[in-house]
């Protein structure tokens, strides 16, 4: 089981850098859209249509001081671009020569190149199918290296003479303004452990609230956006206030109207039928009724007995527009299992300073699970004369 | 006369439009620009007169300028007020100020 540092199934459908919870850098955001129809799994994929006019970027900072970055993602290309186009990269330090790029070429092949090293060409991927890209970027020694695989088949390593640098970013995006690629990307996960490479074939589930638990809301403390107390018994639709993504409706939220460090609203979560649960990454959309002074609030995941797993956010929420927080949740004692995950609960509240009034607008858990034995590796979305028709396409078993 | 952002003669109407790039924090912005080969430079006499001469921050302090230079050579003005206890930073994207040491 890999030890993950980042999980993003794009279910948040955000292009915002506010708060740094979804992205730390974006550029040419008009290049991107979220596609709820053409997706590998979860709620959606992100579609990038490069126009050659400006550099598209969706980037996350990684945990500092890492020498290894192990990543895995799904991608789909329907047609080869008119010019060689980059779609994914990872770099170390602040030097372009230590960047590894993944390209789709005009003949439909994928290639990888680290710095000034030899570009290595892989298979054709411009076939309308979903493909799996796995890579391991290592910068701990000279030369920097990048091992990579396409659809679980090893490709030739690319390397560069520079070494001793630290991986700082990963990007979904292009290189400069030259790209003309249209690509769908989904189900991104990453680890900082070299031995995790290659991360086994995976899916990312987008888990949201689906019911109410037992609220400890108090009187005029935990409320919905209309000021109705969220209490048990009586209030049963709190989950509908924090389940909607993209989080654009600021009038649909749970709020804490007065201080109450032991008060909270509680919601149940979508169950998974996966055979195992690797890790969960919490995403929170939040804001407040005012910007100053600083307030406090908590978005928490607990086990069925109320034991805290981890907080997605605990602290100041005093923003007057939607901000995002995210956190790779610390695993519960003994790790996640489908059983303890399915029994887990969301709690929001616990504010020791409710001025300005904090709002919880939406919560999502991006959950990495293995593709079951004999399950799918690549998904064929073209018409195919043989095999199982799933309606939206066909799974090719790997 | 201060404008709707409380600034006088800022942003400069003749500065090049800021690039289509957003970051979550300053550290990330600096890292992104370094990775792309951006540099900094002192303003020329003409740039000093054009961008910084009559600029005032939200407290009416005059400013000192620096030019941030893209790999393509485009020169973008940034300004910091000259009150060392205040140090308000003026930038080219809304709300055109990043605040000051005093909040």
Image: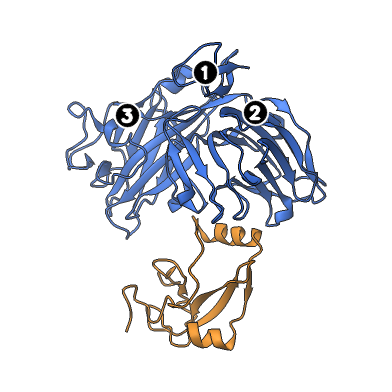
Chain colours: A blue, B orange
| Disc 1 crowd, CA 10 A, few/some/many (<14, 14-19, 20+) | many
Residue that mark 1 sits on: A394
**Residue A248, percent across and down?**
33, 45
Label 2 and label 1 in one chain: yes
Parent chain of label 3:
A
Of badges 3 and 2, nearer the viewer stands 2
Residue that mark 2 sits on: A199
Quadrant for the C terminus of chain A in the image: top right
Give the CA distance from mark 1 to mark 3: 35 Å
Q: What SS does tag 3 mark?
A: strand
Of badges 1 and 3, nearer the viewer stands 1
Q: Quadrant of residue A103?
A: top right
**Residue B77, percent across and down?**
52, 75
Residue that mark 3 sits on: A267
- Verify CB contact (< 8 Å) between mark 1 and mark 3: no
**Residue A27, percent across and down?**
51, 54
Q: What SS does tag 2 mark?
A: loop
Q: Can see residue A144?
A: no
Give the CA distance from mark 3 to mark 2: 32 Å
Parent chain of label 1:
A
Q: Earlier in the sequence, mark 1 or mark 3?
A: 3
| Disc 2 crowd, CA 10 A, few/some/many (<14, 14-19, 20+) | many
| Disc 3 crowd, CA 10 A, few/some/many (<14, 14-19, 20+) | many
Parent chain of label 2:
A
């Amino acid at each position: 089981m890999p030890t993950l540092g980042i999980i993003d199934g794009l279910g948040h459908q955000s292009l915002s850098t506010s708060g740094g919870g979804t992205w730390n850098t974006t550029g040419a955001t008009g290049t991107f859209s979220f596609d709820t129809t053409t997706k590998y799994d979860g709620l959606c994929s992100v579609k990038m249509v490069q126009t050659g006019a400006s550099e598209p970027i969706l980037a996350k900072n990684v945990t500092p001081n890492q020498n290894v970055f192990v990543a895995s993602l799904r991608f789909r290309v329907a047609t080869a671009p008119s010019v060689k186009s980059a779609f994914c990269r990872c770099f170390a330090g602040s030097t372009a020569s230590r960047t590894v790029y993944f390209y789709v070429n005009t003949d439909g092949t994928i290639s990888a190149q680290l710095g000034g090293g030899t570009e290595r060409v892989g298979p054709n991927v411009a076939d309308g199918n979903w493909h799996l890209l796995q890579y391991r970027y290592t910068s701990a020694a000279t030369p920097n290296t990048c091992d990579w695989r396409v659809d679980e088949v090893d490709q030739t390593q690319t390397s560069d003479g520079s070494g001793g640098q630290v991986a700082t970013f990963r990007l979904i995006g292009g290189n400069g303004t030259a790209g003309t690629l249209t690509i769908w990307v989904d189900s991104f996960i990453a680890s900082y452990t070299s031995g995790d490479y290659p991360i086994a074939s995976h899916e990312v589930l987008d888990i949201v609230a689906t019911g109410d638990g037992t609220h400890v809301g108090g009187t005029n403390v935990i409320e919905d956006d209309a000021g109705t107390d969220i209490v048990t018994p009586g209030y049963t639709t709190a989950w509908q206030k924090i389940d909607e993504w993209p989080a654009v409706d600021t009038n649909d939220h749970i709020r804490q109207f007065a201080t109450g460090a032991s008060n909270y609203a509680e919601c149940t979560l979508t169950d998974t039928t996966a055979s195992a649960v690797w890790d969960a990454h919490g995403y929170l959309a939040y804001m407040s009724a005012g910007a100053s002074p600083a307030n406090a609030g908590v978005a928490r995941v607990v086990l069925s007995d109320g034991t805290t797993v981890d907080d997605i956010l605990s602290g100041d929420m005093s923003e007057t527009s939607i901000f995002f927080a995210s956190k790779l949740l610390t695993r519960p004692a003994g790790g996640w299992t489908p059983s303890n995950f399915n029994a887990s609960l969301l709690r929001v509240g616990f504010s020791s300073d409710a001025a300005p009034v904090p709002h919880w607008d939406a919560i999502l858990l991006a959950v990495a699970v293995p593709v079951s034995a004999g399950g799918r590796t690549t998904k064929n979305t073209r018409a195919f004369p043989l095999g199982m028709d799933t309606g939206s396409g066909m799974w090719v078993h790997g | 006369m201060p404008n709707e952002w409380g600034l006088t003669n800022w942003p400069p109407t003749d500065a090049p439009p800021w690039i289509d790039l957003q970051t979550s924090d300053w550290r990330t912005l600096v890292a992104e620009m370094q990775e792309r080969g951006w540099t900094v430079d002192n303003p020329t006499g003409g740039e000093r007169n054009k961008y910084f001469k009559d600029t005032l921050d939200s407290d009416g302090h005059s400013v000192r300028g620096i030019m941030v230079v893209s790999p393509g050579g485009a020169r973008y003005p940034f300004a910091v007020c000259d009150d060392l206890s205040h140090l308000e930073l003026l930038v080219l994207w809304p709300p055109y100020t990043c605040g000051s040491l005093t909040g």
